[in-house]
Image (cartoon, grey):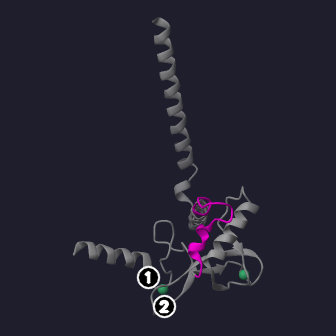
């Protein structure tokens, strides 16, 4: 009986320690200034998240050449080169894009940088996903997530238009009717 109680007490104590450790980890993450990161770092984190999401989506398919990518067949995606000497923005096959993302992830499995693939124009590893502004009067092509972590990734830096925002507004209006 007494032994039993001692075990209970010690396991409670262990639990307390584990909880305390978690708290300390959390505090040190915020103390490290995670919330004060410059916009470029936050943009990087978003791109990493998008890349991971794409990767998880890809891996959840069957086999290494997962037919899941076939759903992108015939679709196009905007990309922009961040190499100052190139800065080319162009459309590429969406399926090919995710194949490249997957290839880069395999070649650099420990990479924590943004999802970047090789530019077809300059051959440098500096091509990122981009967005073409949905405002017909604007049409600017910009890197996805330019507006920062707290805003829609497709917010245009020139005219402020966001297709995601517009779609949500329209959906909300339909629900309200
Ligand atoms: Zn380039
Ligand atoms: Zn625009």
Q: Residue at x 56, y 44 (%)?
A: 28
How many neighbours does mark 1 have within 10 angstroms: few (below 14), some (14-19), or many (20 or more)? some
Q: Nearer the viewer, residue 33 or 43?
A: 43
Boundaries of the magenta span: 57-74
Q: Where residue 117 sits in the image (x, y, percent)?
A: 70, 72
Was residue 73 drawn as part of the magenta stretch in this picture? yes
Q: Element at badge 2?
A: loop
The answer to whether residue 95 is left or right of residue 1 is: right
Q: Are marks 1 and 2 in contact (CB under 8 Å)?
A: yes
Label 1 and label 2: CA atoms lie apart by 9 Å
Residue 105 percent location from the top left of the image: 70, 62
Left or right, 114 with reference to 12: right
* The C terminus sits in image quarter: bottom left
- Circle 2 is placed at which residue position? 138
Question: Quick check: is the Cβ at mark 1 less than 8 Å away from ligand 2?
Answer: yes
Which residue, given by chain and number where applicable, does mark 1 sit on? Answer: 161
Q: Which mark is residue 29?
A: none
Q: Secondary structure at mark 1?
A: loop
* Quarter of the N terminus within the rendering: top left
The residue under the point 43% across, 82% down is: 161
Q: Is residue 6 above or below residue 119?
A: above
Question: Is 127 a magenta residue?
Answer: no
């Amino acid at each position: 009986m007494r032994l039993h109680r001692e075990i209970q007490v010690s396991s409670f104590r262990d639990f307390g320690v584990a909880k305390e450790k978690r708290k300390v980890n959390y505090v040190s993450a915020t103390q490290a200034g995670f919330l004060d990161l410059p916009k470029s770092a936050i943009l990087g984190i978003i791109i990493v998240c998008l890349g991971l999401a794409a990767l998880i989506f890809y891996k959840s398919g069957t086999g290494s050449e997962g037919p899941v990518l076939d759903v992108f067949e015939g679709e196009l995606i905007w990309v922009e080169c961040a190499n100052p000497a190139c800065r080319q923005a162009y459309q590429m096959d969406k399926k090919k894009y995710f194949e490249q993302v997957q290839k880069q992830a395999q070649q650099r499995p420990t990479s924590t940088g943004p999802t970047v693939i090789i530019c077809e124009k300059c051959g440098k590893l500096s091509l990122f996903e981009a967005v073409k502004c949905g405002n017909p009067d604007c049409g600017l092509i910009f890197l996805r997530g330019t507006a920062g972590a707290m805003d829609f990734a497709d917010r245009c830096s020139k005219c402020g238009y966001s297709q995601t925002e517009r779609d949500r507004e329209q959906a909300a209006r339909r629900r309200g009717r």
